[in-house]
Amino acid sequence: EAGVAQSPRYKIIEKRQSVAFWCNPISGHATLYWYQQILGQGPKLLIQFQNNGVVDDSQLPKDRFSAERLKGVDSTLKIQPAKLEDSAVYLCASSLVRSSGSTDTQYFGPGTRLTVL
Amino acid sequence: ELKVEQNPLFLSMQEGKNYTIYCNYSTTSDRLYWYRQDPGKSLESLFVLLSNGAVKQEGRLMASLDTKARLSTLHITAAVHDLSATYFCAVVYMEYGNKLVFGAGTILRVKS
């Protein structure tokens, strides 16, 4: 079974530039997450989708970050304009939804390492 | 506030020794995960603990959960170099839309 795919794996940009990350979840996983992992910290949830609807975006800096999940499958996360403090690894994860409505184990992709200069 | 605290944050061990990593969380939860992350790699799920008193073991790692104390432990038995990695605990908060909140991680280095 293929895992969660992400691209690119690495990106270096200058501050105030824009950048986009792509994620393809495990087939059949209705729930998709984007996390930000700053060096030395645990992942922090930015946004959660169920199918193509947003479930939680409370920690997404909406003045510069945006995300979409078209057709309930692939997703893109965009930063515009980037700041120095956005340097981090951006992880995408996906999970099944149980019949009870709760979500199952999250499976993570390899991440995109973003460096903002 | 949803908090997950791990300690220690860094652990250097000799091969063959035993040690325990602790994970405390701030409010009621019905699920707790332990993940492993190797340098430059993504997170791999090790264990999911679903109920008070749950214990799971895989090789040299054993995880347990005490929901009354809001505490989980990851015990390492007779450490080997291959266990060197960062270990995260993560707690699911059902009352907050099944949000998964991670601890800061424990960097484990096993020296031969």
Image: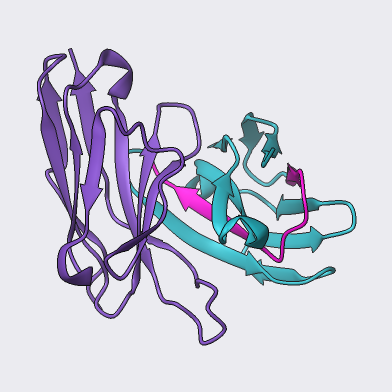
Chain colours: A purple, B cyan
Over which residues does the magenta segment extend? B18-38
Q: Residue at x 16, y 14 (%)?
A: A15
Whether residue B111 appears in this view of the structure is no
Residue at the extreme right of the image, as rendered: B68
Query: In this view of the protein, which residue sits in the foreground, A32 or B47?
Result: A32
Q: Residue at x 60, y 40 (%)?
A: B103
Q: Is residue A113 left or right of residue B99?
A: left
Above or below, comparing residue A37 to residue B66 in the picture: above
Q: x%, y% of residue A23?
A: 20, 56
Q: Is residue A47 magenta?
A: no
A57 relative position to A83: left or right = right
* Residue situated furthest bottom in the rendering: A99
Q: Is residue B36 magenta?
A: yes
Query: Which of B77 and A105 lies nearest the eye of the viewer?
Result: A105
Q: Is residue A55 left or right of residue A25?
A: right
Classify residue B92 by image quadrant: bottom right
Q: In x, y percent, where is residue A101?
A: 53, 78
Q: From the viewer's perspective, is residue B14 above or below residue B54? A: above
* Viewer can see residue A89: yes
| Closer-to-camera residue (B90/B55) | B90
**A7 w.r.t. A98: above or below:** above
Residue lying at 27% horizontally and 14% vertically, measured from the top left: A84
The percent position of residue A115, horizontal first and vertical second, equals 21, 23
* Quadrant assignment for the C terminus of chain B: top right
- Name the residue: 71% across, 60% down: B63
The quarter in which the N terminus of chain B is drawn is top right
Residue nearer the viewer, B54 or A57? A57
- Secondary structure character of the magenta stretch overall: strand
Q: Position of residue B67 (x, y in %)?
A: 83, 60
